Image (cartoon, rainbow, N blue to C red):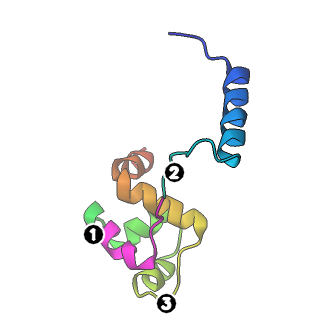
Amino acid sequence: MTKRDIGTEIINGLEEIAAWKRGEIELKTTELKLPKASDVIKIRERMGVSSEVFATFMGVSVRTLHYWEQGRREPNASARTLLLVADKQPEALRKVFSH
């Protein structure tokens, strides 16, 4: 395994940003779409867990989870990030809570 030179990587990154600002290069961008309240039911159902279990996974009350599922409230940024994990890597949540 080759040892990384973090300093060189940072300098290269800064040079790349400067070139982008000058219009010399285009950078690849990726848009990350975080889940919304309207996605909660689908994510929970795909995980195959009850509201009570999913609320525990999310660290919220069942009432809050139901508000999300009903579209009465939107999850905050941290909850939306955890919902993304639940959606893309559900086994990660199961593993954390299986101990």
Q: Position of residue 83 (x, y in %)?
A: 45, 63
Nearest the viewer among 89 and 60 is 89
Q: Which residue is mark 1?
A: 45
Nearest the viewer among 57 and 81 is 81
Span shown in magenta: 32-45
Q: Position of residue 67 (x, y in %)?
A: 47, 85
Element class at badge 1:
helix
Question: Which residue is drawn at the image coordinates 62% and 17% (left, top)?
Answer: 4
Q: Image height check: is 98 above or below 11?
A: below
Q: Image height check: is 59 above or below 68?
A: above
Q: Image height check: is 99 above or below 3?
A: below
- On screen, residue 58 versus residue 43, left or right, reads right
Q: Image height check: is 95 above or below 38?
A: above
Which residue type carries mark 3?
Answer: Arg
Question: Which residue is drawn at the image coordinates 50% and 9% (left, top)?
Answer: 1
Which of the labelled discs sits on residue 29, or is there none?
2
Q: Which residue is mark 3?
A: 72
Which residue type carries mark 2?
Answer: Thr
- Whether tag 1 and tag 3 are in contact, CB under 8 A, the answer is no
* CA neighbours of label 2 inside 10 A, class few (<14), some (14 to 19), many (20+): few
Nearer mark to the viewer, of 2 and 3: 2
Q: Earlier in the sequence, mark 2 or mark 3?
A: 2
Element class at badge 3:
loop
Rendering quarter of residue 49: bottom left
Residue 10 part of the magenta-drawn span: no
Element class at badge 2:
loop
Residue 34 part of the magenta-drawn span: yes
